[in-house]
Image (cartoon, rainbow, N blue to C red):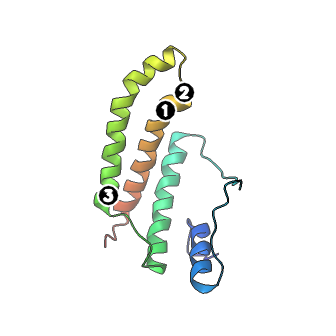
Amino acid sequence: FNPYLYSGGDADISWRMQKQTEFKIKFIPGAIVYHKHRIDIIGLYKQSKRYEYGQLLLHKIYPDLKLATVKERRAEVLNATYAVLRWFPGGIIKFTNKTIDRTTLFYNFFVFIYCLGTYRGRISKIDDR
């Protein structure tokens, strides 16, 4: 692993494999990946911000890696905000009627927090090319 990457080490390995070896990455539908998920909103926000920092560092190493622009990140936040505002009022009714669970109720909110973290990570390390 690259010691300068504090996020994105797995992506770094896959990029290096593709560029420096004959190995090919293959999708395996039955594969199981164990991933540590954050258990609170602050943890999710910080994780997404750290992921964005990792993307910026990876982009410096691999310039052909597509990097979202600040404008694209801002649009993601706005779209996630609209999704929360559109979904949540009706979702409360569905949740109250027990036709959805709380994960489904809060899904768009979690997406919003994630998008906000990546946007904040992006604008705090502006390197918009």
Residue 120, quarter of picture: bottom left
Q: x%, y% of residue 81? A: 34, 39
Are circles 2 and 3 on residues that touch, CB within 8 Å? Answer: no
Mark positioned earlier in the residue sequence (2 or 3): 3
The residue wearing badge 1 is: 106
Distance (Cα) linking label 1 and label 2? 6 Å
For residue 16, above or below residue 33 = below
- What residue do we see at 31% from left, 37% from top? 82
- What residue do we see at 65% from left, 75% from top? 1
Q: Secondary structure at mark 3?
A: helix
The residue wearing badge 2 is: 102
Q: x%, y% of residue 50? A: 50, 59
Q: What quarter of the picture does the C terminus occupy?
A: bottom left
Front position in the image: 110 or 39:
110
The residue wearing badge 3 is: 72
Q: Secondary structure at mark 2?
A: helix
Distance (Cα) linking label 2 and label 3? 29 Å
- What residue do we see at 62% from left, 71% from top? 25
Instruction: Please state if 23 lies on the left or on the right of 108 as rendered.
Output: right
Are circles 3 and 1 on residues that touch, CB within 8 Å? Answer: no
Query: Tag 3: residue type?
Result: Glu
Q: x%, y% of residue 72? A: 32, 58
Query: Tag 1: residue type?
Result: Phe
Q: x%, y% of residue 35? A: 66, 52
Callout 1: 10 Å neighbours few (<14), some, many (20+)? some
